[in-house]
Amino acid sequence: MSKVTRKKKLLWILGGFLILLFSGIGYLLMMYMNLTDTVDMMHEPIERELSDMREKPVVFKEYDPFSVLLLGVDERDNDGGRSDTIIILAVNPVLKSTKMVSIPRDTLTEIEGKGVRDKINHAYAFGGIEMAMKSVEYLLDIPIDYVVQVNMESFKEIVDAIGGITVNNMLDFKVGEESFPKGQLSMTGEEALTFVRMRYEDPRGDFGRQDRQKLVIQAVLKQGASVNSLLNYKGIFSAIGNNVRTNMTFDEMVDVQANYRDSVNSVDQIYINEGHGKMMNDIWYYIMNEDELVRTQNELKTHLEL
């Protein structure tokens, strides 16, 4: 092979490499710009800057433990909406673990700022995100640092955007014409929403529903981080931007990703299931067991180093 031919071949290889390199940089730059736009859509500041139960703000660069309230909200026509999914995450980066507790939506508690005792899922309907946060703080006796609100009616868009999810279903059940057999289940967004919402076919009621919520959340996180999902980042960002709201800023999200990502690899679920149901004025409420509530409060406080 002549020197000229070798040089041409080398130039072709080098040119191809540069094209791939700059295409990759362009793709990442485009992804970054779309991501920042999405976070701007998601970001919804709340009135309070700091929980009344905090003396100083959480500092992510110092690896402070923090808490997140996840609200799955059903908003329908002529209805302000109710938070039918109420999940608290307590994240500790030093222990590299997260405590997760799902509060039964019919739990009777004080609605902070309203001056009444009612179902905890009514707090959002009465006073939006901030009243929901304060009511959860009152119940669990811990500060709630951040909140993530997900529109459950459109949650299916997020699942579809990541190409669907797969979960290991532990209960054979049917809702309408849809069947959910035991074992590995691949689901579309519509199926995942039905899977999460089902209560009455489950002998464990709201507690079985809590387990399915955890399965779906973990499946969404896992699938969302896959290569195929990242290639469809525009669809994912669009679905998230339209259906998720949070008081966490872009810079805070970057810090969490940098310093806390190992914490989500170990999720320990705290179960609330020792209470009982009670009819009061023809309305069914869930009454928490006091000893269990205190144990839950203490476990969360310990994990948050309070």
Image (spheres, rainbow, N blue to C red):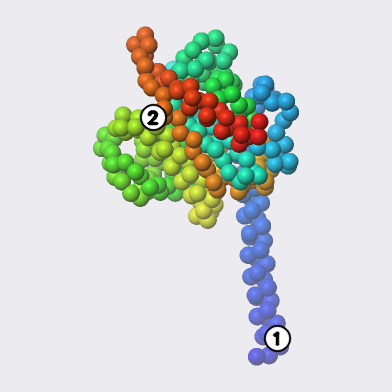
Q: Nearer the viewer, residue 285 or 273?
A: 273
Q: Name the image quarter holding the C terminus.
A: top right
On the rendered structure, is 184 left or right of 250? Answer: left
- Residue at mark 1 to residue at mark 2: CA–CA distance: 74 Å
Residue for point 45% across, 30% down: 272
Going from the N terminus, do you reach mark 1 or mark 2 first?
1
For the point 63% across and 60% down, the residue is 23
Count the labels in the image: 2
Q: Residue at x 55, y 9 (%)?
A: 115
Q: Residue furthest left?
A: 177
Residue 74: % across, % down: 45, 26
Query: Disc 2 marks which amino acid?
Result: Asp
- With 38 as the anchor, is 168 left or right in this view? left
Give the residue at mark 1. Answer: 4
Say which quadrant the N terminus sits in. bottom right
What amino acid is labelled 1 in the image?
A: Val
**Quadrant of the rendered image containing residue 169:** top left
Residue annotated with mark 2: 206
Q: Is residue 177 left or right of residue 99?
A: left
Percent across and percent down for residue 133 are 58, 23
Residue 5 vs residue 82, the one in the foreground: 82
Say which quarter of the image contains residue 56: top right
Q: Secondary structure at mark 2?
A: helix
Residue 304 in view here: yes
User: Looking at the image, can residue 128 be seen?
Assistant: no
Q: Farthest front residue?
A: 291
- Residue 55 located left or right of residue 42: right
Q: Residues within 10 Å of mark 2 (few under 14, many from 20)?
A: many
Residue at 65% across, 34% down: 305
